[in-house]
Amino acid sequence: MHFNKLLILVCLFTFFLVNQASAQVEDTVSKATDTLKSRNYRPMKVDSPKVMTRRDSVKSKYVNPGKVAGRKAVLKSLILPGLGQIYNLQLLNDGSRAGKNLTFQRIYTIGKIGAIYGGFTVLTLSYIESSKQYDLYLKELQYRNNNGGKADPNGPFIKADGSEFSTSGITTGKDTYRRNKQIVLFSYGLVYIANVVDAYVAARLHFFNIDDKLSFRAVPTLINSNSMYSFRAMPALKLSLTF
């Protein structure tokens, strides 16, 4: 009886040990790794397509150097009279007309700068003189208006024999000098505009192909002298210029 119980206990203990051993083996065996998941894939770098802009798709336009130079000359002349002519003088030294004698053009350009400031100087002196005379005549008229038409004894409008200049003559002189002042101011504007136009034209002409090849051709021809319904031929001379 005791032997049977002992045998049963040994069998149960053996079964328990076998189960523990199998569980230990299953825990220690590593699972097969998924090679597809564990593999490190580097992302492929795909170049993004180049975006075409309007500037890339449109062909570059031709830039006229004469227009660019003309705009620069106008801007400089507007800022300071004569500065556009100095810019044109620099264009003559850029080497684009190598082999040509540009001495006369340089002298001519420098002369235009002198003429511009000479004109402003003459106009300024004329304006100062006209203003001085206008104030003098106006002062005399104001004195006569306040003193019953009598001339200022200390003024310059009394002749050597003691007679006075007429009031109407002094009024005419005042109006003349006032008009001279207005003409001088208008002339300032003309010189200023002429300075801008000259700078622009000279800058544009610098990039024209101007050479010494000038020729003409005279060919006899016939023209219609009747402009209504019939043709009446008249001899004429056709002149063609090539430059």
Image (spheres, rainbow, N blue to C red):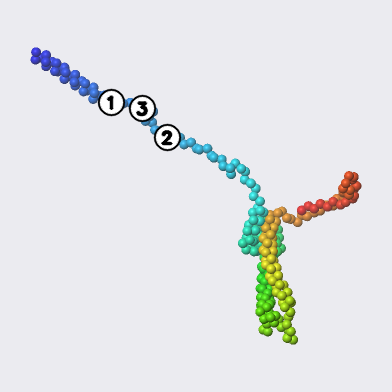
Q: Height in image: 151 above or below 33?
A: below
> Position of 46 compared to 205: left or right?
left
**What residue is pinned by disc 2?**
42
**What residue is pinned by disc 3?**
34
Q: Quadrant of residue 42?
A: top left
Q: Which mark is residue 29?
A: 1
Residue 83 placement (x, y as % from top left):
63, 62
How far apart marks 1 and 2 lie (CA) works out to 31 Å
Residue 128 placement (x, y as % from top left):
66, 73
Q: Nearer the viewer, residue 218 or 117?
A: 117
Residue at 69% x, 64% y is 190
Q: Quadrant of residue 16?
A: top left
Q: Height in image: 24 above or below 154?
A: above
> Position of 224 compared to 196: left or right?
right
The answer to whether the residues at label 1 and label 2 have Cβ atoms under 8 Å apart is no
How far apart marks 3 and 1 lie (CA) works out to 15 Å
How far apart marks 3 and 2 lie (CA) works out to 18 Å
Say few, some or many: other residues with alpha carbon within 10 Å of mark 3 (under 14 / 14 to 19 / 20 or more).
few
Say few, some or many: other residues with alpha carbon within 10 Å of mark 2 (under 14 / 14 to 19 / 20 or more).
few
Residue at 74% x, 55% y is 211
Q: Height in image: 68 above or below 161?
A: above
Task: Identify the mark nearer the N-term, 3 or 1.
Answer: 1
Q: Secondary structure at mark 2?
A: loop
Say few, some or many: other residues with alpha carbon within 10 Å of mark 1 (under 14 / 14 to 19 / 20 or more).
few
Under mark 3, the amino acid is Asp
Can residue 58 be seen here? The reply is: yes
Q: Secondary structure at mark 3?
A: loop
Task: Identify the mark nearer the N-term, 1 or 2.
Answer: 1
